[in-house]
Amino acid sequence: MFIIELLRFFSGYVRFKGSGGFSERFINLCSVHDIPLWNIAYHGDYFEAYTTINGYRKISICARNSGVKIKRTRSAGIPFVLNRLKPRVGLLFGAIFFVVCLAFLSNKVWVVEISGNKTVPDDIILTAAVDAGLNFGEKTDKINAVQLSLNTCKKIDKLGWAAIRVNGCCVYIDVTEAEPAPEIENREGIYNLVASKDAQLVILECYRGTTQAKRFSSVLKGDILISGTADNKDETTSLVHASGYAVGRTVTAIEETTDTTINTTDFNIIKRIFRLNFFSIHIPIGKAPDKYHQKFISTKNLSFNGRDLPISITCEQYYTKQQKNKTISVKEAKMISMSRFMNSAANFSQGKQIINSSVSFNENQNSATVSGEFICYENIGSEAPLEIELAE
């Protein structure tokens, strides 16, 4: 029964209502003219029945000869659906084209997601993966994830491992950054521990060798703090690699000066071109200039639901540069000197404990100077080879 109803739906059918006249004669005439009728039901002064589309087209003859008035109450089936879609045939073909494109592109690489990186940018990892063989638009069943992982790690030294997996049209790259190898101290040779700069010795701990300086004494750069000689119990002396920990109180001066006349580089844009990227296809819009000094590239991806799609627009800007002298005000020179001084002080203070500092400003018509003095505790121990003079 279900198959019969399914076939009737594909071929189309009509439900109609008949009233008046002679209904028995109407049914007999339909049988004579090979008009199929089914599900005939009487409801008092009218009846309802179903017939095919061709049968309904010929039913008017039987209705006229039997005096029955026919009225269509329902039309169902594929032919009526297609008839209603005729004005929207473009939409139908567009839907079919969309389904075909979706089926065709569902097994290709659309999206690449990168995770696990902390210091290595996503762009560098993506570029390395593309150079290793990952291409947008490539079929996912052709991707060798293991080989692609190995080739990606070889191109970036900071990566320890890259786990690549494919899920649908997405490629997930989960990276693990390599830890820096610990430095192995070279214990070969004979060395003294000397002062790396002038200081007042505050802490001196001898691990190996013989102590030559005293705490709270003043030492000059190059003075021996721990010598590479060790006294044995048999009253002999051995040469060793001296080691220890020395902290001194140091005074360091930092000065930064900026003139009001500085040398600057001006960049002037000469051309801007665009490039449309669709998967691995690049469509340039414009031509690059023959001569330029600098090129800046920026790419903007089309995203959907928070994910970048393989459709992007790249903007390339070409510049020329020109060196020239520029005169600035004393206030601007002072700001530049202050910025340089802050950077120098930040670099200097790493690994040191500053206990006191002072900063002074000096300016005239031609320059501005920022100077400072820092008193701090720092490690002043430095290894120096032990020089031995052999007697002839």
Image: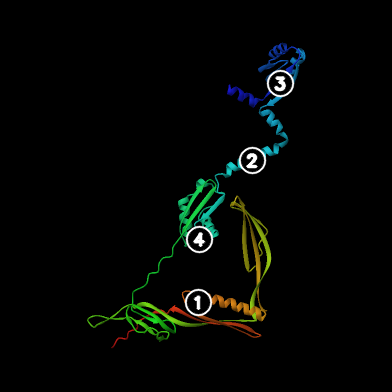
> Would you place residue 107 above or below residue 294 in this image?
above
Residues at marks 1 and 4 touching, judged by CB atoms closer than 8 Å: no
Measured as percent of width and height from the top left, residue 96 is found at 64, 38
Say what secondary structure mark 4 lies in: loop
Looking at the image, is mark 4 or mark 2 earlier in the sequence?
2
| Residue annotated with mark 4 | 118
| CA separation in Å, label 1 and label 2 | 66 Å
At label 1, which amino acid type do we have?
Phe
Looking at the picture, tell me which residue is in the foreground, 286 or 327: 327
Looking at the picture, tell me which residue is in the foreground, 220 or 238: 220
Say what secondary structure mark 2 lies in: helix
Is residue 135 at least partly visible in the picture?
no
Give me the residue at 55% from left, 59% from top: 123
Looking at the image, is mark 1 or mark 3 earlier in the sequence?
3
Is residue 272 at least partly visible in the picture?
yes
Say what secondary structure mark 1 lies in: helix
| CA separation in Å, label 1 and label 3 | 97 Å
Looking at the image, is mark 2 or mark 3 earlier in the sequence?
3
| CA separation in Å, label 4 and label 2 | 42 Å
- Crowd class of label 1 (few under 14; some 14 to 19; many from 20; radius 10 Å): few
| Residue annotated with mark 1 | 348
Mark 1 vs mark 2: in front: 1
| CA separation in Å, label 2 and label 3 | 38 Å
| Residue annotated with mark 2 | 97
| Residue annotated with mark 3 | 16
- Crowd class of label 4 (few under 14; some 14 to 19; many from 20; radius 10 Å): few
At label 4, which amino acid type do we have?
Lys
The answer to which image quadrant residue 335 occupies is: bottom right
